[in-house]
Amino acid sequence: MTVLGRNVAADQAGSTIIEFAVALPILTFFIYGIFAVGRLYEANAGIQHALGEGARYATLCLNPTSSGCTNPTDDQIKTKISNKLFGLADSAGWSTPTITTNTTSKTKTITVRYQETPDFLFVRGPTITLTRSKVVYYPS
């Protein structure tokens, strides 16, 4: 089978572009997915940092007196956490921190949450919730 003296079955011209056309959408999908997962890692770092700063602040003795300490209020701790957020965690997926106080053991459990639904170009992923907690002892 020849066309103008060339063997069509052995002709390799154009095969590279066909392979590229098949591989490009798959490669683009994977690269986009890597960025979507990277966004979750960035949000995780942001909430971990904010949680650590809030936990540190909760352990401070703001006004030491002879009878004890003035501890930060829960609202002050929540404000500190919200002010220390960075990256994608400081967006719509962030929810207000919750603080549970146990007066018997003099501890506070601080919990933060972040939700995101990753977008993999043409496909929406499942909603992912990142939840982190810390238990801190507060001064008396």
Image (cartoon, helix red, strand yellow):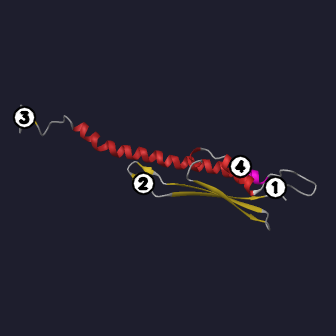
Mark 3, residue position: 3
Dot 3 or dot 1, earlier in sequence: 3
Kindly check if marks 2 and 4 are in contact, taking CB atoms under 8 A apart as contact.
no
- For mark 2, give the secondary structure: strand
Nearer mark to the viewer, of 2 and 3: 2
Q: Which mark is residue 71?
A: 1
Q: Amino acid at mark 2?
A: Arg
* Image side of residue 104 versus residue 37, left or right: right
Magenta region, residue range: 55-59
Q: Residues within 10 Å of mark 2 (few under 14, many from 20)?
A: few
Q: Amino acid at mark 1?
A: Asn
Q: Amino acid at mark 3?
A: Val
Q: Nearer the viewer, residue 124 or 7?
A: 124
Quadrant of the rendered image containing residue 72: bottom right
Mark 4, residue position: 80
Dot 2 or dot 1, earlier in sequence: 1
Q: Nearer the viewer, residue 79 or 104?
A: 79
Quadrant of the rendered image containing residue 111: bottom right
Q: CA distance from mark 3 to mark 1?
A: 89 Å
Q: Residues within 10 Å of mark 3 (few under 14, many from 20)?
A: few
Q: Is residue 15 magenta?
A: no
* Image side of residue 60 versus residue 84, left or right: right
- For mark 3, give the secondary structure: strand
